[in-house]
Image (cartoon, helix red, strand yellow):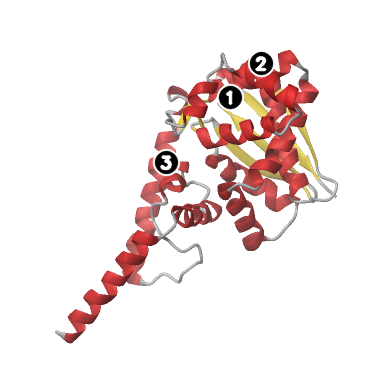
Amino acid sequence: LRRCALRLEDDGRKARRRAREDPISRIERGIMRVLCDPIQSADHLEHGSHEEDCRGRAQTPGQALTGSSTAARRMRVSSDSMDERTRSAQVSQRHLRGLLQTIDEQPESDARHIRSLLADHGLGRVEAGTETWLPVELLVSWVDAIEKAYDLTRVEALFHRFAFVESKGSILRSFVGGALRMFGNGGRVLARRIPSGMTLMYRDLGRTSERGVGAHEHEIAIGDLPAACASSKAYVAAVGAYYQGLFDTLKVAGAKISIAEHLPEKARVVYRCVWT
């Protein structure tokens, strides 16, 4: 009876601690799971579900079923990915609000002008904050509108700054900080984690992969892009500028991001990352 009483008391303390827990800490644990397992979806991060430790554990015979469940989960993800083209790609409302914050940092006249451009492209939906995810076409329409009013150079400068602004936010800051703590600093570390990091901002946005090309070179490929993304030169350039901003924020020496391949008809784009 005494042991039961002690266990109940301990369970009560844990329940009270979970009730008081800051949601951001749950999100950060989800981010650490993505760092360790890129298959995790952004939904885990939004809701902070599961509390698995990233550190490797020796498997005992009694834990053998864990491997089976993990394999089954991977199979489900693989099966789901086959239907990506039939699902609508979405962008996080949080990501769009970060872009608005970057726009508001521009000279006052430019910020007002850009906001007026976006008024006809779903600006109200983003500011309302009632939708966690919005169609990715909304973001593409923003980028195209800015490029039309200014030029491609202005779009790239804006998204380069956007990466810096967003890296200071709670989710991306935790992701970047976690990557550095776990894997160290350097161009290859960042290039390898970018596909996982993009699940914080997008879902169902084609298939992202990465591969090393040389000692100081990496490629990030995105295939099966939605038509709106693949056909927009401004959007493709904006994503490259955002990647460049991440590398520059982390002070990766000699970092240069370029578009190695852009094939709208094949819904594919490849970014080349080099550093010294």
Neighbour tally class for label 3: few under 14, some 14-19, many 20 plus, Cα within 10 Å: some
Neighbour tally class for label 1: few under 14, some 14-19, many 20 plus, Cα within 10 Å: many
| Circle 3: residue type | Val
Q: Is residue 90 left or right of residue 157?
A: left
Q: Which residue is mark 2?
A: 145
Which residue: 63% across, 25% down? 268
Q: Position of residue 204 (x, y in %)?
A: 49, 31
Q: Is residue 210 above or below residue 174?
A: above
Which residue: 64% across, 35% down? 101
Please tell me whether mark 3 sits on a helix, a strand or a loop. Answer: helix
| Circle 1: residue type | Leu
Q: Position of residue 251 (x, y in %)?
A: 79, 51
- State the separation of the CA atoms marked 1 and 2: 10 Å
Which numbered disc, 1 or 3, marks the residue that appears first in the sequence? Answer: 3
Which numbered disc, 2 or 3, marks the residue that appears first in the sequence? Answer: 3
Q: Which residue is mark 1?
A: 139
Q: Position of residue 163 (x, y in %)?
A: 69, 40
Q: Nearer the viewer, residue 74 or 113?
A: 113
Q: Which residue is mark 3?
A: 77
